[in-house]
Image: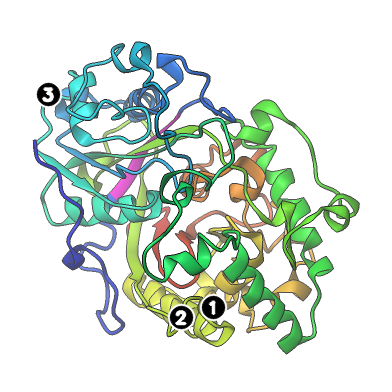
Amino acid sequence: MSTSPAPASVYRTEEGLGLWEHRGKVAAVGIGHSPTFRRWDGTPENSVGGISLKALRRAIQDAGVNPADIDGLVMDPSTTTGAFWPQGKPLPWDAINAYNRTDDPLDGITGLSADWILANMLELSGIGFTMYGVGCMSNAICVAAQAIGDGRAHTCLVLKSWHNLEGRYYQGGANAGNAIPGSSAIRSLWGTPACFGTAVQFAEYCRKYGKSHDMMAPFIENSRKNGLKFPEGYWAQHRPEEITPEDYAAARWIAKPANLFDNDMPIMVSAAYLFTTAERARHLKQKPVYILNHTTSRTRPRGLTPTLDEVEEDTARTARKIYEGAGITANDLSFENMYDGFALFHQFHIEGLGYRGLKFGEALDFYQTDISISGPNPVSPSGGNIGCGRSRFWMHTDCIQQIQQRAGERQVTGVKPEVAVSGGPMPVGGNYMVWSATPD
């Protein structure tokens, strides 16, 4: 089966589109997570393909669906942003040959195709629709929601997986060469770390609004506390360590003013969701969580790195699209779960949303108040990437679980979880989803 990236027509990128035409007609009904690991241990079962099969089967079981009744698969074929198989290193044939192979021997090891999944999940005998949402789960869930709404599938698995190999992140692939073509050389070959752009924006934010890096400490502390209540997360499984304000203040700089704890940790992990029509969802095992809208930012900055003004303009524009398509306002949000892979841009997301009435420049003061899961203003109850490790999907899982009232120790108690928003990754350029306890 030939699988292509989703076309531009799938994404809702413009203002003025009105309510999403499929508002409340698509629902999330199943969740599956693999175990997490810091790095691949070389075993077939813990390869990115192996953990993906675990996550997919757990999502199917969680929803209580017959695998043969599933007719759609949406996934991201990329499984890393910076960990590549070293040139010249022998291929791991034991792990490769443990599964049904495709033409690419590293399929299931450092990448993942729909063909590989279907070749190794023969129980998915009814798949007639496949598509790629490239980049992260935030992209893939938008593609899947639109596909179900448009009638291209009625029961669809959505998958995002990550691999992490030994060695330093971002040192392989094109970065291992002596030259890099185009403008990417400025960021890659010349050595600025991935968080550099966000650090520049945050420095300007602090200058403009009279804030300081130390004011981020409550957000970091809260994120890790929430993450330690997320049993599927890396820190909860392997390193149950809290971050104190003193830890945060003492951490080494990566790109000042971004320090070690402002950056997420690459890990190996996979997650899958099962989406279906609202009608089918009523008869399944879990409480349906309805999708009210999805939207996308495709804004291109004028330079290599968006300015603070561009970030604020785009997050405000994204919020207007979120609310317009869902038919809600900021006052309807029970909590927020926007992306945080670089902690220093989380406030850009929530200020753009106007979460709890926030205006630009006010989020760091807001962080000094009660932003816990037991208070009236929960911020990132998932713990996000900071609290759980790099995946870009903890926030989506958390929104679904919170609304289903099965988030366990992480369950928000200061508010009734009825409407939530999640998405990312970057404030300029990302995909976003609105979740609801009801289809209305």
User: Which of the marked residues, 1 or 2, is nearer the chain's N terminus?
Assistant: 2
Q: Image point 22% across, 30% down: which residue?
A: 104
Residue 329 percent coordinates (x, y): 46, 76
Distance CA(mark 1)–CA(mark 2) = 8 Å
User: Which of the marked residues, 3 or 1, is nearer the chain's N terminus?
Assistant: 3
Q: Image point 67% across, 37% down: which residue?
A: 229
Is any atom of residue 121 visible in this view?
no
Above or below: residue 70 compared with residue 188: above
User: Which of the marked residues, 2 or 3, is nearer the chain's N terminus?
Assistant: 3
Magenta-drawn segment: 27-33
How crowded pointer 2 is (Cα within 10 Å; few <14, some 14-19, many 20+) is rated as many
Residue at which label 2 appears: 314
Is 338 left, or right, of 277 in this rendering? right
Distance CA(mark 2)–CA(mark 3) = 42 Å
Q: Is residue 32 magenta?
A: yes
Quarter of the C terminus within the rendering: bottom left
Residue at which label 1 appears: 352
